[in-house]
Image: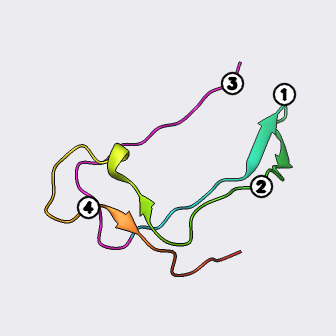
Amino acid sequence: MQAFKKIEVWTAPRILIIHLKRFNYRGKYHFRDRLDHLVEFPLDGLDMTPYVLGSSDVPPIYDLFAVSV
């Protein structure tokens, strides 16, 4: 069985930080495998409107500033 996690917020932050947990836990002893699926995201104009429940004067649209590997 597969599970999905969804998070919604009331207001969007000025700076958005996204942390991807790229591991799969399996088995009785919780062995950890690294996921190697390609994650695609826009460099400019990431629209988070569907995940923000409240209203705001400024739309929650973000441009990529940095990546930490």
Residue highlighted by disc 2: 38
Mark 1 → mark 3, Cα distance in angstroms: 17 Å
Residue 59's disc number = 4
Q: Which residue is drawn at 71% across and 74% down?
A: 69
Q: Earlier in the sequence, mark 3 or mark 2?
A: 3
Query: Which element carries disc 1, helix, strand or loop?
Result: loop
Residue 28's disc number = 1
Query: Which element carries disc 2, helix, strand or loop?
Result: loop
Q: Which of marks 4 and 2 is nearer the N terminus?
A: 2
Query: Which element carries disc 3, helix, strand or loop?
Result: loop
- Along the line of sight, which residue is nearer the eye, 59 or 33? 59
Label 1 near label 2: C-beta < 8 Å?
A: no
Question: Which residue type carries mark 2?
Answer: Leu
Mark 2 → mark 1, Cα distance in angstroms: 28 Å
Q: Residue at x 60, y 61 (%)?
A: 41
Q: Which residue is drawn at 85% across and 29% down?
A: 27
Q: Magenta stretch: give its range.
A: 1-15
State the image coordinates of residue 33 (x, y, percent, origin top left): 86, 47
Q: Which of marks 2 and 1 is nearer the N terminus?
A: 1
Question: Which residue type carries mark 4?
Answer: Pro
Label 2 near label 3: C-beta < 8 Å?
A: no
